[in-house]
Image (cartoon, rainbow, N blue to C red):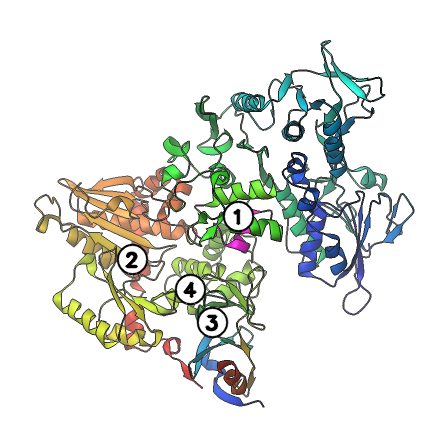
Amino acid sequence: MDMSTPMGHGPKMKLVMVGNGMAGVRTLEELLKLAPDLYDITVFGAEPHPNYNRILLSPVLAGEQTVDDIVLNPLDWYSDNNITLHMGKKVVKIDRSARAVETEDGTRAEYDRLLLATGSNPFILPVPGADLPGVISFRDIADVDAMIRASSQYKHAVVIGGGLLGLEAANGLMKRGMDVSVVHIAPWLMERQLDEPAARLLQKSLEEKGMKFLLQKQTAELVKGESGRVAAIKFKDGDSAPADLVVMAVGIRPNTELAESAGLHCNRGIVVNDTMQTFDPRIYSIGECAAHRGVAYGLVAPLFEQAKVAANHLAHYGIGRYQGSVTSTKLKVTGIDLFSAGDFMGGEGTEAILYSDPIGGVYKKLVLKDNKLVGGVMYGDTVDGAWYFSLLRDGKDVSELRDHLMFGQDHCGNLGHQGINKAATMTDDMEVCGCNGVCKGDIVKAIREKGLFTLEDVRKHTKASSSCGSCTGLVEQILAVTAGGDYSAAPKTKSMCGCTDHTHEAVRAAIRENKLLTIPQVMQFMEWRTPNGCASCRPALNYYLISTWPGEAEDDPQSRFINERAHANIQRDGTYSVIPRMWGGQTTPSELRRIADVAEKYAIPSVKVTGGQRIDLLGVKKEDLPKVWADLDMPSGHAYGKALRTVKTCVGSEWCRFGTQDSTQMGIDLEKVFFKMWAPHKVKLAVSGCPRNCAEVAIKDVGIIGVDSGWEIYVGGNGGIKTEVAQFLVKVKTPDEVLEYSGAFLQLYREEARYLDRTVHYLERVGLDYVKKKILDDNEGRRALYERLLFALSVERDPWVERAKEGKLKHEFETVAA
Amino acid sequence: MNQWTDILDLTDIPKLGARVVRHGSLDIAVFRTADDEVFALEDRCPHKGGPLSQGIVHGKKVACPLHNWNIELDSGCAVAPDEGCAREFPIKVEGGRVWLDLSAVERAAA
């Protein structure tokens, strides 16, 4: 087939889109961003409306929003982008040989590329009376209008289907003042998202609002009344109920009629490949009508992923692939919090952790398999939904979290949002994101005004939850309330960054196995999309290279974040802070005198004692840094780097009447051996001389406690965003063993952790058992790890000495006058 | 009127890096890309005034060191959805030397 395309100055290619819904229009938006002038675009929509947010039909029905509120792309958008829009025109024919589509009324449009985004159709039960006036589905604005009209004239509504859509319809009708019964064939509501206990709680709270339920009822017939309109519903067991309005919400079917008539391969959807092309490569399909690897998705987030890929391909970039999504569900009924994801029922080979408080209206169930979270359902308290969902998606080993998993992320020590776990109870001026100072109102405004749908979008526009991430759950709740339901879905594997599809692990393996020594080599070998990466992958690659090939791979200062390039910490005003190293927190009068002199000589505005038993000189001008270092004549404290920071100590047995071991000397030894160690993230150590633990070793990456008979080693502690207590690794007898075991652990972390993972994140991923196997069970392996660390450290030099005394990278600190 | 001024050698700027050129009290960040293109921007991020010269240069962009906004080197403007622009100044390379138009710098400083 001739796939050549007119490029350059020739006539534009023609792109026709059938279906004017969310997935399709998102594809156009993505395409216009990438290649605004590549196509003449024509859009056909069967509904007489511009693109609107279908997920928000429920709030419109419930009277919480209006149709105007939910329009995503007003007519101006189409004209501003030179898109020819045919509203209210249904395409009935694709002439593939002539490459044209035709509508019912004979309108014809030719295409070079065709995008089928026909969505889905509601499934109508094939029962007598299904075609009576007053029997409708819940799919579009016309259905909502019909329901609103009926609610003002009639009393009795019956909703067939107790799934997500049915309950949202029932809730809306009830709010419009109708008497609503929900008919459901299964023994409990939302059986595809909820287990029985959660569904019973849901049923109870809906019943308290006035909704009625007819469970395990099968519809036999819809009965015509005197007016010719539906009047009652009859069931197979002989019962019946009055019904002036019947809403069928029993499911949707991909709308493949048009595609099938054109001979495109369909199998429970229009079958597409990873670039969203159908069996005719000129024809793309995305959205609810498309079947990708056997799955037709019905939630927004995966559809937007698809849209991105299709747009990318249509724009001739051809670098994106859609590889499927994991999805989760949230019900949009005001006042009801419900979340479910994955295999929530469990079954053979799985185990469940349950929390049930029927009076308080809270139910949680987490399903585990092989120490991994595979599913969950939550009712009444869903703030941790996003956290569980990410554990599930990443396939994290949760055996270490198991005993407090149920109590959520807060219980794991999350700070920074006042302990609030319900976004709905927050006022607009309350702060959601403590890192970036973003209030609830800012987020709501951005979602409304910029039409955001995904967590990523919100992060980009508002910066909320983009720093430490601890408020992610709240942001997702706000997103769910403001933009509608299904916010959380993500690609199955996480690539390093937008420059590549490869994971951190794959990149590290390639560097190791192919002996790649420079960043350009890695980028070429792994087919990076960008010419020289981005601010997120370059520092990671630089670290992977120098840690894998110490002494051979050369450090690239231009790929270092400024702090590690200038070897000082950049401050908000562009000045720097300098923290010289004080071994084990010990200093001397002469060092203190030099620090005092330097502070005065260079007019350093602030001198502060740090939390790590050192002294911080804040507000140093960049050009003064080499002179400051020279005058201090102390080693670099690496307080600016993903490197060994401080080794905090208590005074220990030399002075303390309780001390059992010389913790200060142990700390000094550790710090001297591990000095200059680069790592995936910062590394903090501490040594206490007795179990009173004055050096707070429980929140350090490696913490040592001296006891009468030796030393206990703890790993993976963290005192930051997420307070995490270190776990016991081993008890050893001698200081040499402390060095070897600690060093081996740190080297394992250096070799295997993803860049920017702290030791706690690494441990969460691999599990403590794995680390024990490597460090405790394998003596040779441990010694080899330690040797590799010592070798890597042997080629490192003190960066302050190099710059202060040897003039290395002088240009970094010099300003040019003009 | 242009006032082209020879400020430094191209090789004085590291590839994928920047130098700070000071004119009076105005700091100008002069960037060099992997392909030896040069750009001059006022050394102030439109977000919170971060020194762009200290950021990581990638492609034709620089990531501000303070909050990681990405700024387009050729326009000085933030990559969407962030909004705002840093002032840009005419700059060129001739015979391996980098020339800056000081008249534009002076207009900006005034």
Query: Is residue B16 depicted above or below A165 in this figure?
Result: below
Q: Chain of mark 4?
A: A
| Residue A728 falls left or right of residue A193 | left
Quadrant, the N terminus of chain A: bottom right
Place of residue A663 in the rendered image (x, y in percent of width and height, measured from the top left): 16, 50
The extreme right residue here reads A106
- As drawn, the label of residue A645 is 2
Do the residues under discs 4 and 1 have CB atoms within 8 angstroms?
Answer: no
Give the extent of the magenta segment: A452-468
The kind of residue on which mark 4 rests is Phe
Q: Mark 4: few, some, or many residues within 10 Å (few <14, many ≥20)?
A: many
Q: Mark 1: few, some, or many residues within 10 Å (few <14, many ≥20)?
A: few
In this view, the residue in front, A208 or A644, is A208
Q: CA distance from mark 4 to mark 3?
A: 17 Å
| Residue A71 falls left or right of residue A810 | right
Do the residues under discs 4 and 3 have CB atoms within 8 angstroms?
Answer: no
- As drawn, the label of residue A494 is 1
SS for callout 4: loop
Place of residue A175 in the rendered image (x, y in percent of width and height, measured from the top left): 64, 30
Asked if the magenta segment contains residue A89, the reply would be: no
Q: CA distance from mark 4 to mark 1?
A: 23 Å
Q: Earlier in the sequence, mark 4 or mark 2?
A: 4
SS for callout 1: loop
Place of residue A209 in the rendered image (x, y in percent of width and height, measured from the top left): 58, 24
Q: Mark 3: few, some, or many residues within 10 Å (few <14, many ≥20)?
A: many
Q: For mark 3, what is the residue?
A: B44
Q: Mark 2: few, some, or many residues within 10 Å (few <14, many ≥20)?
A: many
SS for callout 2: strand
